[in-house]
Amino acid sequence: MKLTIHGAARQVTGSMHLLAVGAYKILIDCGLDYEKDRSLIDNENFPFNPSEIDVVVLTHAHIDHSGNLPTLVRLGFCGQILCTPATADLTELLLFDSVSIFLNKTAKKNKHNRKKHHHGTQQQPLYLQKHVMDTVERFVTIGFNRPFRINGDIVLTFIQVGHLLGAAAAIFKVNDNGEEKTIGFTGDIGRHNYPVLNDPEPLPPVDYLVSESTYGGRYHTKDKTVEQALVETIEKACIKEQGRLIIPAFSIGRTQSLVYSLNKIFTSGLLPPVRVFVDSPMAVAATEIFRKHHNQVNSDARHFYESQGDEFEFDNLVYTQNLKDSRQVSNYFEPCIIISSAGMLEGGRIQDHLYENIQNYYCTILFIGYCAKGTLGFRLLRGDPIVRIKDRELAVYATIKKTDVLSAHGDHEDLMNIARGQDKAKLKNIFLVHGEDVSMEALAAGMEAEGFVVTIPEKEMGYDL
Ligand SMILES: [Zn+2]
């Protein structure tokens, strides 16, 4: 069999790996590559003919793993897409949202070109709604730990990895000309004791492992729980200073874990009540998917549900759907918590909240996720005294804070533990993907020091296994 790393090589986005067993071709993930130096439309240049792929296996819904599927379908892929049931639902939501983002971006670009009198071809979005519809029709869902025979020679098993509802590692058992070989793709590895999600399960022993490396060389702070970190910040921002706390959060996954943690804090009386607004229609839709797949949440959340009721509802929590409601959030003058997307502050309703509050001394902005270089979130975290929001230069008077307690990726130790859980005598090679160079090198050094053979592939590198 042959493994080719077509994406997320020495970078985080654009996960896409090809596993060929004889003439049969399996594509593992088909993510959007949105690295800063690349144009989105470049995602249509596949290094293979999409019609030659027999099946796609999708590890989880995040756009850097799923976001290029509609392009693959648009360009001729006509097989099935295998994933877990929650991944199917969350991916559908995210892909339709991507179409809206593309349409907005291309409309803006075309308007800009017209203004500058740049004539020529109009920018086209990478894909349209109809391509997303053609894509979601191809989903075939498989539960965790249920071996699924793809063909006479290949069996696929999904193992739960935390990280996001439905997220899985894909383990393949292959009969390669009479010889049994196993290869595992970690997808993204989550953390232990993460609100709402189950812990990552150990992977079965494999011959080859393709592992993510996002947090290689980095360690999460472990001195505070999610609830302790939130209580500390809310107490200062909303109770002592009587101000507002804005938490930029990705609508899918992060927001649900945050809402559940706040639910526990306020229900148990750890803090006096504070109004909480979740200002994101996507978050409302995603929360419905979490409710639908309630059997996938962890035992803590399930226990809470049985004893206290819905994890995602509590007194003083308000979900806003339309723009009119969103404006009312701005006009609420009591201390409050506003959770809104996007997490890196690029677009979304969070921009309105920042525009109105960035010059407010009684406002705290709490970052709970990673902000890529070049984003407004990155500039605020860097400490820029003046930032540009909605075409205006604004001085930053709000307090900027950051915590990693809600990061959805395992850290260096968690990734090391995935390798340590393997049978060292059996495991021939670990291929590192989905990380920046410095993270990959730190993780490779850690793994090699413990006797593992590690490869950091360049893009398009192929390996006969
Ligand atoms: Zn992910």
Image: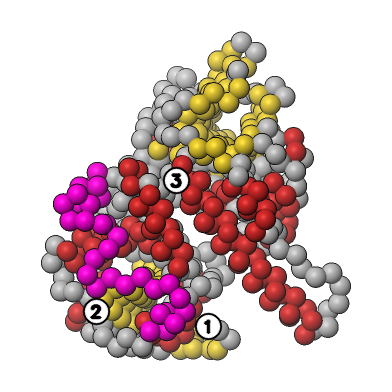
Classify residue 242 as left or right of residue 185. left
Alpha-carbon distance for marks 2 and 3? 35 Å
Q: What residue sits right under mark 2 in the picture?
A: 238
Residue depicted at x 60% and y 18%: 153
Q: Quadrant of residue 96?
A: bottom right
Q: Secondary structure at mark 2?
A: helix
Residue at image point 36% right, 40% down:
200
Task: Identify whether 259 is placed above or below 400.
Answer: above
Find the magenta span and give its range.
Answer: 299-328
Q: Earlier in the sequence, mark 2 or mark 3?
A: 3
Rounded to the nearest angstrom, the CA distance separating label 1 from label 3 is: 35 Å
Percent across and percent down for residue 305 are 22, 52
Residue with the most extreme left position: 269
Residue drawn at x 70%, y 70% as measured from the top left: 106
Magenta span contains residue 305: yes
Q: Amino acid at mark 3?
A: Ala
Amino acid bearing label 1? Ile
Q: Which residue is mark 1?
A: 389
Q: Earlier in the sequence, mark 2 or mark 1?
A: 2
**Residue topped by disc 3:** 86
Q: Residue furthest top?
A: 178
- Graded by Cα atoms within 10 Å as few (under 14), some (14 to 19) or many (20 or more), the crowding at tag 2 reads many
Residue 95 appears in the picture as rendered: yes
Q: Is residue 129 magenta?
A: no
Image quadrant in which the N terminus is located: top right
**Residue lying farthest to the right in this orientation:** 120
Which residue is rendered at x = 51% and y = 46% of the image? 88
Q: Amino acid at mark 2?
A: Cys
Image position, residue 62 (x, y; %): 51, 52
> How far apart, in angstroms, are the residues tagged by discs 2 and 1?
24 Å
Compared to residue 308, the image places residue 422 above or below, namely above
Q: Residues within 10 Å of mark 3 (few under 14, many from 20)?
A: many
